[in-house]
Image: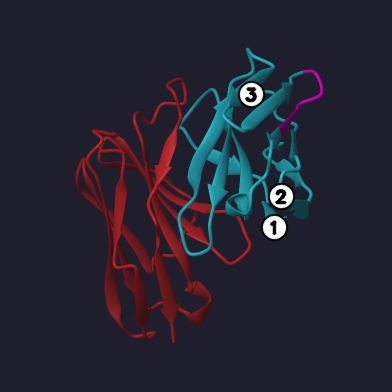
């Protein structure tokens, strides 16, 4: 199984809502990532989890709250988002978080988020 | 130092032609260079990747050429097909710290029938 799955595929939420994005992988990967991608732009790294611990937070606003309940799951909790947060949110995983290892990252299909 | 510069921004190629996308980097600590293909509404998919110890890697119709001294690498798509129409991102990753990718800005490829 070389797949990263994400749910939901689409999400529309108001600025006062609380919602969560979910990501799952069963490849035994120990690094998981959240990216944000705006139209016609490359993915922007948000968070990196290494062995279920938050390793990198790229100065993301606190209205985005990541969580890694176990080595296969990654959540992104959303609260009080702004319309400019509308984007494709991508999850990715790699075998090992260390840069000295083979660095192949597998991406999920993404969640298309619209904030009204 | 962290940037990866990608060109062209968009590319139109006739079916059967060769598509060429170029990337350049400054940081010599980069040691892994993947190319990702992304279709609209989908996540990026790893297409092919190279490390600096080789100058070329070929997988099917896709070839990466790597010039370490010039700090440049390129993707060649031979016999381009309409199904290759997508956005292509080059990326680079460093040999220390955590495995994070620095992406180029992307190239929208359209292969005309």
In this rendering, position of residue B101 left or right of residue B69 = left
Residue A68, position in %: x, y? 24, 49
- Please say whether residue A108 is visible from this viewpoint: yes
Q: Residues within 10 Å of mark 3 (few under 14, many from 20)?
A: few
Q: What stretch is highlighted in magenta?
A: B69-74
The chain in cyan = B
Q: For the residues tagged 3 and 1, is the chain the same?
A: yes
Mark 3 or 1, which is nearer the eye? Answer: 1
Q: What element carries label 3?
A: loop
Q: Residue at x 69, y 36 (%)?
A: B78
* Chain ID of residue with mark 2: B
Residue at x-position 62% and y-position 33%: B62
**x and y percentages locating residue B14 in the rendered image:** 76, 51
Name the residue tied to disc 2: B15
Q: What element carries label 1?
A: loop
**Residue B29 bears which disc, if any?**
3
- Which residue has dot 1 on it? B113
Q: Which residue lies furthest to the right in this view?
A: B70
Pointer 3 indicates a residue of which chain? B
In-image side of B107 versus A63 (left or right) = right
Placement of the N terminus of chain A among the 4 image quadrants: top left
Crowding at mark 2 (Cα within 10 Å: few <14, some 14-19, many 20+): some
Q: Quadrant of residue B63?
A: top right
Q: The red chain is which one?
A: A
Q: Which of B46 and A76 is in front in this view?
A: B46
Q: Quick one: label 2 or label 1, which is nearer the N terminus? A: 2
CA distance for labels 2 and 1:
5 Å
Under circle 2, the secondary element is loop
Quarter containing the C terminus of chain A: bottom left
Tell me which label, 3 or 2, sits earlier in the chain: 2
Dot 3 and dot 2 within a common chain: yes
């Amino acid at each position: 199984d070389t797949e990263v799955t994400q749910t939901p595929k689409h999400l529309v939420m108001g600025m006062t809502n609380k919602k969560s994005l979910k990501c799952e992988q069963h490849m035994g990967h120990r690094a998981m990532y959240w990216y944000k991608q705006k139209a016609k732009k490359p993915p922007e790294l948000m968070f990196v989890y290494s062995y279920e611990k938050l390793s990198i937070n790229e100065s993301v606003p606190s209205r985005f709250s990541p969580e890694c309940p176990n080595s296969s799951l990654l959540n992104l909790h959303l609260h009080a988002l702004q319309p400019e947060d509308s984007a494709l949110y991508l999850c990715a995983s790699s075998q090992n978080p260390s840069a000295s290892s083979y660095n192949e990252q597998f991406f999920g299909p993404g969640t298309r988020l619209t904030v009204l | 130092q962290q940037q990866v510069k990608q060109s062209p921004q968009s590319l139109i190629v006739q079916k059967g032609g060769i598509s060429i996308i170029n990337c350049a980097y400054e940081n010599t600590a980069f040691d892994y260079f993947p190319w990702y293909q992304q279709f609209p509404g989908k996540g990026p998919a790893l297409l092919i990747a190279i490390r600096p110890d080789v100058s070329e890697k070929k997988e099917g119709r896709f070839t990466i050429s790597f010039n370490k001294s010039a700090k440049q690498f390129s993707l060649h798509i031979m016999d381009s097909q309409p199904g290759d129409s997508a956005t292509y991102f080059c990326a680079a990753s460093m040999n220390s710290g955590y495995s994070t990718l620095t992406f180029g800005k992307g190239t929208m490829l359209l292969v005309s029938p």
